[in-house]
């Protein structure tokens, strides 16, 4: 039974982490309505699920991530050698700066994380956030395509998208939906808006994983053979479903069809309000 739960959690985490329907909201509903609580707090298990999602991003955007890492290194060299001039930076170096700036607002999210987690216990509130998320997705399809890419986007754009990501810490508000919509509002073209959203998820997921690891290190959570096998199953399902979700979202984003997810979130939100 625990293995089935692990697979279900892995599927939900992988799909909802990247599809704009809120992973935190769906995991909260699974726990609150369906009673799928897994090994108590299951800090280690949730950490492993996040790593599965992270692996999916690395596989799908390996080339871009590699270029950004190289860009970050050359950027540091330019800063310390006095050769830093923003207008002369390469697109990879600009991309690294944009990701860094967009991640800064999450520091506030880390400070209020425990208070935000409490909201997940109230299913009706999660349902309300899902309805708000639906409105955001309906809006996204009506935003005209922009022209900005990593070569032309500005730090001001990154700040705005970072704020959008901060708002998405609420359970039921999708991180990918908020940041892609924020990118479109900033004038990004749709392909770059999706790519920027996925790549900026890396520091977000890494940060969440670090905090969960700290919590796990300070807990007395038991680790046995069943737990280890369940973690492996959850990791595998989160990884594979994450890859599928990234492919699907890229296809749908190009066709301006986020309303499909909007309808889903609207229905899910209403059901959560009724049965929560």
Image (spheres, helix red, strand yellow):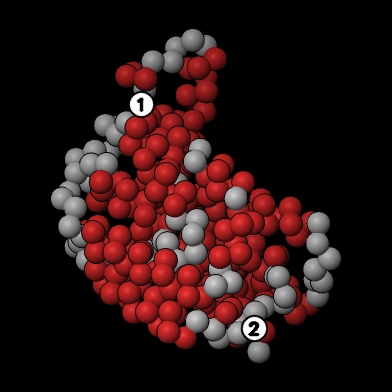
Q: Residue at x 35, y 64 (%)?
A: 132
Quadrant where the image shows the N terminus: bottom right
Residue 174, image quadrant: bottom left
Judge from the rendering whether residue 119 lies leftward or rightward of residue 159; answer left or right: right
Residue 113, given in percent of the width and then of the height, sits at 60, 54
Judge from the rendering whether residue 211 lies leftward or rightward of residue 9; answer left or right: right
Mark sitting earlier along the chain (2/1): 2
Can residue 236 be seen by looking at this rendering? Answer: no
Q: Which residue is under mark 1?
A: 90
Nearest to viewer (mark 2 / mark 1): 2
- Which of the pair 238/43 is nearer the observer? 43
Residue 53, given in percent of the width and then of the height, sits at 52, 61
The answer to whether residue 97 is above or below residue 242 is above
Residue 142, given in percent of the width and then of the height, sits at 17, 57
- Label 1 sits on a secondary structure element that is loop
The answer to whether residue 162 is above or below residue 274 is above
Can residue 131 be seen by looking at this rendering? Answer: yes
- Label 2 sits on a secondary structure element that is helix
Q: Which residue is under mark 2?
A: 3
User: Which residue occupies the extreme bottom position in the image?
Assistant: 1
Q: Which numbered disc covers residue 115?
A: none
Residue 49, given in percent of the width and then of the height, sits at 59, 66
- Which of the pair 99/151 is nearer the observer? 99
């Amino acid at each position: 039974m625990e293995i089935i739960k692990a697979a279900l959690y892995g599927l939900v985490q992988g799909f909802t982490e990247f599809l704009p329907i809120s992973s935190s909201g769906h995991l909260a509903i699974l726990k609150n309505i369906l009673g799928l609580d897994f090994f108590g707090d299951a800090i280690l298990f949730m950490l492993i699920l996040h790593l599965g999602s992270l692996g999916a991003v690395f596989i799908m955007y390996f080339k871009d991530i590699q270029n950004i890492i190289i860009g970050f290194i050359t950027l540091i060299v330019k800063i310390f050698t006095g050769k830093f001039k923003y207008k002369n930076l390469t697109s990879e170096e600009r991309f690294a700066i944009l990701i860094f700036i967009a991640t800064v607002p999450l520091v506030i999210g880390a400070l209020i994380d425990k208070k935000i987690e409490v909201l997940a216990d109230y299913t009706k509130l999660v349902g309300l956030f899902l309805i708000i998320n639906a409105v955001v997705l309906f809006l996204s399809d009506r935003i005209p395509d922009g022209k900005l890419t990593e070569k032309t986007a500005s730090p001001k754009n990154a700040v705005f998208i970072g704020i959008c990501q901060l708002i998405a810490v609420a359970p039921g508000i999708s991180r990918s939906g908020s940041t892609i919509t924020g990118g479109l509002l900033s004038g990004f073209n749709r392909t770059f808006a999706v790519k920027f959203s996925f790549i900026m998820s890396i520091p977000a997921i890494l940060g969440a994983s670090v905090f969960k690891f700290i919590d796990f290190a300070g807990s007395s959570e038991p680790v046995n053979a069943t737990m280890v096998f369940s973690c492996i199953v959850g990791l595998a399902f989160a990884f594979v479903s994450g890859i599928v979700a990234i492919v699907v979202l890229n296809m749908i984003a190009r066709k301006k069809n986020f309303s499909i997810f909007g309808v889903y979130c609207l229905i899910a939100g209403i059901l959560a309000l009724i049965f929560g």
